[in-house]
Amino acid sequence: MDHEYDVVLVGSGIAGAVIAKTLTQAGKRVLLLEAGLAAGMALSPEPSYANYQRYLETFYSKANKATNGPYPDLPDAQSPDVLQIEAKTPYDEGYLVQNGPLPFASDCLRSPGGTTLHWLGNVPRMLPNDFQMKTLYGQGVDWPISYDDLKPWYEMAEYEIGVSGDVAAQVGPDMDRSNYGDDYVFPMKEIPQSYQDQVWMKNTENLSVSLYGKDYNVTCVSMPQGRNSIPNPAYRKTGIFWNDETKRLELAGDEPGKYEVVGAIWDQNTGNRCEGNASCVPICPVQAKYNALKTLKKSDHSKLDIATQAVVSKLLVNDTTGKLDGIEYKVYANPASPIYTTKVAKGKIYVLAAGALENAKILLSSNAANSSDQVGRNLMDHLVMLMWGLFPEKVYPYRGPGCTTYLPTFRDGEFRKDFAAWISPLDNWGWSWPTFAPGSDVSNGLAAGKFGKALRDSLADTVTRQALLHFECEQAPDPNNRITVSPQYTDLLGNYRPVIQYDASDYMRKSFEAAKKVGDQIFAANGIEDFTDYNPSDADYVTWKNRGYTFWGAGHIVGTHRMGSSPADSVVKPTQQTWDHDNLYLVGCGNMPTLGTSNPTLTMTALTFMAAEAILKQLEA
Amino acid sequence: MTTSRNYTDLFLPISAWLTGFDTTELQATGMTATYYATITTKNTASCIDDFFAQAELVLQEGGGDEDKTNSLIASQLFPTSCYNNLAQNIITMWYTGEWAPDVNAAPSLAEAHNISPNAYVQGLMWTAASTHPPGAKQPGYGSWADPPIGPPVDAPLTSISNAR
Amino acid sequence: MSQHYQAPAPRRRQQLFRPDEPLHGCGLITSLDSLRSHLQTAIEIEHSTIPTYLTTLYTINPITNAFAYQTIQSVVMEEMLHMTLAANIMNAIGGHPAVNTNDFIPEYPTYLPHSDDAFLVPLQKFCKDTVDVFLKIEKPAHKFVPPEFNNYKTIGQFYKAVKYGLRYWDHVTPGGIFTGDKSLQVTCEQYYGGGGKLTAVYSLSDAVLAINEIVGQGEGMDGTIEDPDQVFFGEDVEYAHYYKFNEIRHERRYRPEDTANCPPTGRRVHVDWDAAINMHPNPKMKDYPVGSPLYNKTLDFNQSYMRLLTCIHDAFNGQPDLLMKAVPLMYDLKYKALDLLNLPLGNGEMAGPSFEYVAI
Ligand SMILES: Cc1cc2nc3c(=O)[nH]c(=O)nc-3n(C[C@H](O)[C@H](O)[C@H](O)COP(=O)(O)OP(=O)(O)OC[C@H]3O[C@@H](n4cnc5c(N)ncnc54)[C@H](O)[C@@H]3O)c2cc1C
Ligand code: SF4
C-alpha cells in the first residue's frame, strides 16, 4: 500500500461513502481507511447477510435496546455509548470524557457504514432562513452559502439516500413549494402516516396555541424519510455522474418512472418497502432504511481499496509546504488487544469523513487545520425535550417507522431572536425512549400487584394509548461547547479520547419553557393526560425560572470544524477544503456553521456532494 | 441437585394464571421448554419443589374459579417474598424474555441480556399491547396506517382449563 | 490489511423462453368464455402451490437453513407474482378473476388443478420427499410437447395452450379481445419484493410477455440450451424454480458451465434436512374436537387466510390498491402459522396450517 492514491479517505459513513462512490465512479483511485471490523464491510450477498444477521441476533439478545447495542463494541476504536451518559460530570468511565457542566448526550457508531446503521432516517431540508441566523436573528453565524446555493445538491442527496415524501405537504414557516421548485418530487411517495398520527392530526391540525402573548397556528406535515416506499412515477432522475466536459457533478436523467428502489445490500429484492419493523433505531432488519453501505456498494470497486480495522491517528503535516504528506493509521488484528502496526497512507488529496467527534479529534491530535482555533468548538446537537402522556383512546403505538409526521410551526419566526426554534416530530414508539416502555409497564404493573388477566388488560389498556411528542431544539453555536484532547486520556491504541465541555445556554433553556407551554396546549387539545416527569437525577436535567426540564441527545453531532467565509473564524471553505492545507478536505456534520431544525444528515450529504465536486476539480486541475 | 420431579405439566397452567395468556397462547411462543429450563437452572431445587407444590394446591383449591384462584395466587405465590420472587420472575420472563434477576445483576445495561434472542421476539408484552416486538414479526408496508389487524383479543381465560 | 471488493454485478434474468412459434389456429379453445375459464384455472394453478411452499417454508429456520429458506421464499414470491399476472390477463380480456370462492382452495393433498393427476401436492414439512414434489411441480416441459389445457403434464404445456388461445381469439375477434377495463390492472406500484416484474396487461404482446415471465420463472428452459454462449447459471443469474429447488435437493449451487439436464456441480451449500419442525402432514380442522384450542387456532388461521383471499379478490376486481393491504394480512397469516407449528399434538408431531375454506 505504498503507492499513491488520488485520494485517501477516512471513514465509511454516509459522508465517506458518498466521496468513495462519486470519486471512483469518476475514475479516481481511492483508499478508504475504516476503523471498524472487516466483517462489517462485506458487500456481497452471503457474507453481508451473515454479518447483518449477527447484528440482528445481538439486538434480540440484549435486554436494553440502546442505539449501539447490535454492533460490535471495539475497545480499539470505541464509540460513545448513550448508556454511559450519567448525571455526573466530570465523568470519564465511558469513551467520552465528560467535563460538563452537562454531559453531551449523543452517540455515533464506529463501524463500516457508520452511524447510518442506526440512524432514524428523517430527512427534512433546512429552511432558507436557517442560513442567515446572524443577519435575521442576531444568533450564531450566517452560512457562507445560501439555501439556493445548496438546492441542487439537496436534490442529489435526496436521490442518493432515496427519500420518500410528499413535497407538496412541506408547508410551514419559511417553507413551501418554492423551497423545492414547482415540478420537484421526491424519488418515492410519502411513507403512510401512522394511525396514531391521524388521531393527533384530527385534534391538532390548525390548532391555535398562544405563546408569550402571540398566537401560532399548529399544522401537521408528513415527514420526508430515507426509507423505501412506492417509487414516484413522476420522479425523473436516474443517476449522479461527473461530467468531464463541464467539470461538474450532475444529477442526470430526465425520464419519469425510472427510479429503482435500492434494496438490502445482500439482496436487491429485500427491503423494497419499509415493512414496519419499528426498530429503525437501532437496526432495520430488512434494510428498507437507507444506510451508507448501499452507497459504498455502488462505488467502482476496481478503483477502490478498502483497509478495515485501520484507525487513523494522525495527519502528517509538512510544515514547509503546509500540505499533508500522509496519514498515519494503526491496524489492529484483534479489536480488544492493544497490539497494532502503524502504517502511513499517501494520496494527492486527503479527506476526513470520520464524523464530527473523530474529525475534530484527529485534527487536534495532529495540530492541523486549526489556525482559526475553531477546531473542536461549537459542538452542537438538537436538545430533545420529550413530553409523554396517555391518549383517551387507543392509538396503537409501537408500529411503523419512528416518525411519520412532524409539526413545523416553531421551526422559524421572530422568536428565534429570543429562544431556540424547534421541530416537533410525533413519535410512533410510545414511551420507549423516556421510560423504556413497555418493559417498564410490566414491572410497574407487577409492583402494583397486578398479574394474570389484570396485568394483561392493563397493558392492553395503557400501552396502546401512549403518546410521545418531541421538541428538537436547535442548539446555537457556542465556542465553549467543545472537544479537546489531552494526553491524560487515551484509548487502548494510545489514540486520544474526546474530552468534552458542554452546557445548555439560556437561549436553549428558554426554548424548553416555550416548548412545554406549547406542548401543554397540544396535549390538552388531544385530551392527553400528561405523565411527563423531569427528574433532577436525569443526566441532562436543567432549570429555567425555577422549573426543571430534561433534554436528551438527538444523535445530531454537528459543528466541530465549521465552514465559513474567512480563515479567521472557520476551519473549512465552502468547498470544504481546509483553509490551512490545500490537500485536506473535511466532510460531515462538523462543517455545518449552524444546525437549523432539520435532522442534519441530508444537508450534510448535500454538502458532501459539493465537496466531491471540488475535489474532482482540484484533481483535474 | 435436581427437583424431586419434572413440573412441566404444572408449569404451563400456572404460567397461564400468572400471565393472563392461555396455555395454547403460551405454547404457541415455542418458549415453554426454554423457560422451564430457565427457572430450574436459576433457582434451587427446593425452591422449585416448594413453588410447584404450592402452585398445585392453588390450582386444586381454586378449581378453575377465576376469582378464587386469583386471590390464592395473590396471597400464596405472587408476593416478592415468596419463593425467591419466582412467580413475578415467571411473569416477567413470558412478557419480556428477560430473566429479571440476571438483568438486574448485569454489570451494566449494555451487558444485560435476554434469555435468548428468540425470547425477546416471543415477548408477550407486545402481543398484550396489540403490536409486535420491534425488529421482528414485521407487519408489512403501510400496516401502521390502520389499527392492528383483527380486534385485539381479550385473554379468554376460559380456555386455560383446556390445558393439555 | 487491504481488501479488494468485487463490484457486485447487477443480477441478470435468464432468458428462458424460446422464440414463439408462428401464429396458427388453435383447435383447443371453443370460445372466448372457455379461454377465460382456462385463465381462471391458471390463477388456481398458481395459487395451489402457494400453501404448499409456504407450509414447507415455515417448518424451517431462516438462519440455520438460510439457503433453503431464501430459495423457497423467493419462489413463493414469484408464485404470487404469477397469480397476479394471470389475473391481469384475465381482467384484460374482460373476465373476472375469482379467488374467494369455496372451491378455489384445493383440498390438500391435491393434484394440480386440471393436470394429468400424476402426483399429489401435500402440505408437509421440509424434507427430501417434499423437495422432490416441488421439482415435479416445476418440471420443465419437453421441447416439443403439445399445448395442453387439460391433463397437462407440465405447467408450461398448459400456458402454451393459453398463449395460443389468446392469439387465436385476439386474431379472430373483431376489435380484439383486450378490451377489459384498464383500471382493473394491478401495476408494479402495488407489487414489490420478488424477482420479476409485474406488468400491466393491455394488449396481446403484454399478455405474451406476462406468460413468458410465468413460464420462464417456473420451469425455465426445456432441457437443452439453445444458445451455447448464454450463461444460464451462476451467482448473478436468477434462474427458474426447478433449478433453484434442484440446488437445494443436491445441496450444491450450479456453476456457469453446468447444463440444464445435469445436476448442479458448483460449491456445496448447507442444507439441514433434519432441522425442520415435525409437522403433521396435511392437517385438517376436523382432526381436532370442535372448540378445542387447536381447533380454534386452526380456525383462526383459516379465517385469516380467507381474509387474505378476500382482500386479493377485491384487489383483482376493481380495487388494485388493496393489494398493498394484502401484505400485512400475509404477514399475519405467517405468524399464525408459526404459532400453530409450536403446538405439540402429543405424538411427537406438531400442528400446522391447514389452508381450508371457512366462511367469514
Ligand atoms: C440514534 C440516532 C438517530 C439519528 N437519526 C437521524 C435522522 O433521523 N436524520 C438525520 O439526518 N440524522 C440522524 N442521525 C445523525 C446521523 O446518523 C449522522 O449525522 C450521520 O450518520 C453522520 O455520518 P458521517 O458519515 O458523517 O459519520 P459516521 O456515520 O459517524 O461515520 C464515521 C465513519 O468514520 C469511521 N471512523 C471514525 N473514526 C475513525 C478513525 N480514527 N479512523 C478510521 N475510521 C474512523 C467510523 O467507523 C465510521 O465509519 C442520527 C444519529 C443517531 C445516533
Ligand atoms: S419501520 Fe422497520 S422496515 Fe421500516 S425502516 Fe424502520 S426498521 Fe426498517
Image (spheres, coloured by chain):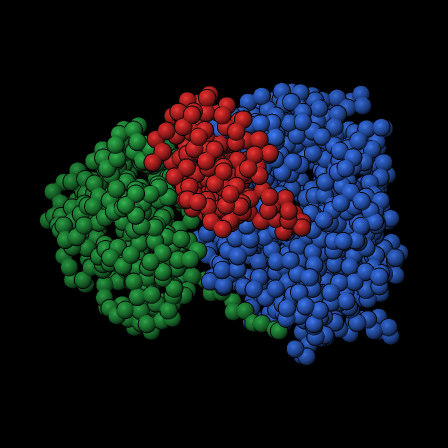
Location of the C terminus of chain C by quadrant is top left
Q: Quadrant of residue B10?
A: top left
Q: Residue lying farthest bottom? A: A2
Q: Is residue A47 visible?
A: yes
Of residue A357 and residue B82, the one placed in the foreground of this image is: B82
In the image, residue A168 above or below residue A491: above
Q: Please give the letter of the chain rendered in green.
A: C
Q: Please give the letter of the chain rendered in red.
A: B
Residue A433 appears left or right of A500: left
Image location (x, y in percent) of residue C252 = 34, 67
Image location (x, y in percent) of residue B87 = 53, 35
Image location (x, y in percent) of residue C168 = 17, 48
Q: Quadrant of residue C132?
A: bottom left
Of residue B83 and residue A533, the one placed in the foreground of this image is: B83
Q: Is residue C243 visible?
A: no
Q: Please give the letter of the chain rendered in blue.
A: A
Q: Quadrant of residue A611?
A: bottom right
Residue displayed at 31% across by 35% down: C294
Q: How many marks?
A: 0
Residue displayed at 78% across by 42% down: A87
Residue displayed at 15% across by 40% down: C34
